[in-house]
Amino acid sequence: MAEKIGVFDSGIGGLTVMKALREAFPGLDMVYLGDLARVPYGGRSAETITRYALSDADFLMRGGVSAVIAACNTVSAIALEELRRRLAVPVYGVLECAAEQAAAATRSGTVGVIGTRATIASGAYERALLAKGGALRVLTNACPLLVPLVENGIAPDDPVAETICERYLRPFRGQGMDVLILGCTHYPVYRTVLQRLLPGVRLINSGEALAEQLRPLYGRYAAGSGHVDYYVTERSVAFDEIVRIMDDSVDAAAIHVDNSFL
Amino acid sequence: MAEKIGVFDSGIGGLTVMKALREAFPGLDMVYLGDLARVPYGGRSAETITRYALSDADFLMRGGVSAVIAACNTVSAIALEELRRRLAVPVYGVLECAAEQAAAATRSGTVGVIGTRATIASGAYERALLAKGGALRVLTNACPLLVPLVENGIAPDDPVAETICERYLRPFRGQGMDVLILGCTHYPVYRTVLQRLLPGVRLINSGEALAEQLRPLYGRYAAGSGHVDYYVTERSVAFDEIVRIMDDSVDAAAIHVDNSFL
C-alpha cells in the first residue's frame, strides 16, 4: 500500500509548504488540513496552540498517515515536542530545518528571524540556531501585521506592504545580518518586497528547507503523480481569494470541509 | 437579588460597547466574555459564527444573567435570530439600534455601512435599514484590515491607518452619504481618522446606539457602582497591549480566563 503523509497548518499559509513538497516529491500521496475555523494561531497562548495542534494531528492520524508535518512555524515553535510525545508516527516541523539552513548559509554569523508574536515569544528559533553550534548572533522581530496584509490582498508591490515591512526590518539594519529566516509560511508571498528592502541578504523559506530535509526520506517520490487531498475546517468568507493568493495552482472548489472534530 | 446582564464578543472589540454601557448604567452588574481563543469571527462562515456565538451565550447563561448582549456586529448580523430562538432571556445585538439611529439621523437618505467581511456579506444592515421605512439608499464596504491594524497598534494618526481607511472609504465618495455606521466594535478606535476623512458625515457608534436603546430598560441603574466581571477564553500573546488599546480604563490583570466550555 502506498504511504501517505499528513500536513497541517492553522490556515492556508501552509499551502506554500505544500507547494514546495509537491514540487520536490510529486509522486507522494499527501493530505492537507487547514484549520480555518480557528485561524490564526500566531497571537494565541501556548496552551491554546498546543490544544489545537493536537486535534489537527489527530484528524490526520485517523486518515492513516505515516508521518505528520506541522506546516506552520507557530505550531513548530510551540507544540512540536508535545506532538512527538503523543503521536505514534514521525513528526516534522518547519523550524529546525530552516534554522539548519540558516546556520549553514551565514558568513557574518548574524542571523535574523521574523515570525508571528507566538513564534518569536517562544524563543524556539534562537534555541534551534544556537544548538547548531558556532557563535551565532540571533536577532528576532515579530511581524503580526504581515499575515493579515497578505490575506487581505495587499500585494508585495503595494506601498503599504513596503512601509510595514520596512518598519519590521528596522531593528535588523546596521547589524551585519546576512541571512533572514522567513519564520511564517505566509511570508514567502512577500519575498520580493523583503528582498528589495534587504539586498544581499539570503532569505530562508521554511517550506523549501523542509523539502530539503525530507529528501533522504521521500526522494524516491521525485517523479510520478501522487494523490493530494485538501481539507479545511471551514470555508471563510473570502476563501477562494485567499487560496488564490497563497497558491494559484490549487483549485479552491476541490477543497473539502470537515469540522466534525472541533 | 440584583439583576446581572451578560455581554459577549468574539474578542475584546466589545470593550468599546462595555464602555458605553458602563457610562450609561454605572449601577448595573455585568459580566463580559471575550472569545479570544477563537477570535476573529469577522471572516468566518455563518455556520461557524453561529456555533461559536451559541457556546459563548451558554457560558453567560450558566452565570445566571437576565439578558444577553451580543457586543459584536458580526454576531449581531449573522446569529441573532438563532440566539433568540435558543435562549430563555432577552437577547440584544448592536445592529438594529445602530440602523435605527442612522435612519433617524440621515437627511440625504444615503447611509453608509463599514464592517467585517461576514457582516457586510450577510446583508443584515441593508435589511435593518430598509425595515426602518423611508426610501433609504444603503452603501456598504467590508474593511477586513481595520481590526488587525487597530489590534497591532497602528494608531489613528499613523499614515498607514489613513491610507487604508481612505481606500475603504473611496466607494462612498461623491454619493451624497451623510451618515456612516461604524459596523464593527473596533472602529471607534479609528473614529478620529474616519471623521477627518469624512468631514460633515455623522459617524454612528454601535455601542452608544445600544446604550440609547437600552435606556428604558436599565435607566434605573444610571447611578451607583455595579459589579463587572471580565472573562476571556485565553490570554493572547499581546493581551495587555490590546486591552489597553481598546479601553485603557480596564485592568488587564483582573480579567479571568475560562476556556472550560470550548
Image (cartoon, coloured by chain):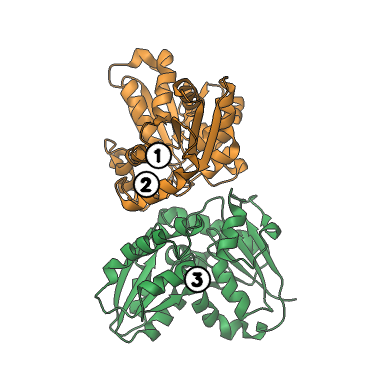
Chain colours: A green, B orange
Q: Are marks 3 and 2 on the same chain?
A: no
Give the answer, above or below, for where A107 lies relative to A111: below
Label at residue B150: 2
Contact between marks 1 and 2 (CB within 8 A): the answer is yes
Q: Amino acid at mark 3?
A: Gly
Subunit that carries the residue with mark 3:
A
| Residue B122 place in picture, x, y as percent | 59, 37
Q: Which label's residue is closer to the chain start, 1 or 2?
A: 2
User: In terms of image quadrants, where is residue B250?
Assistant: top left
Q: Nearer the viewer, residue A177 or B167?
A: B167
- Please name the residue that numbered disc 1 is placed on: B187
- Please name the residue that numbered disc 3 is placed on: A93
Label 3 vs label 1, nearer the camera: 1
User: Distance between the Cα atoms at labels 1 and 2?
Assistant: 8 Å
Give the answer, above or below, for where B183 lies relative to B134: below
User: Distance between the Cα atoms at labels 3 and 2?
Assistant: 31 Å
A193 sits left or right of B50 in the view:
left
Label 3 vs label 2, nearer the camera: 2
Q: Are marks 1 and 2 on the same chain?
A: yes
| Residue A239 place in picture, x, y as percent | 60, 53
Q: Nearer the viewer, residue B239 or B213?
A: B213
Q: Amino acid at mark 1?
A: Tyr
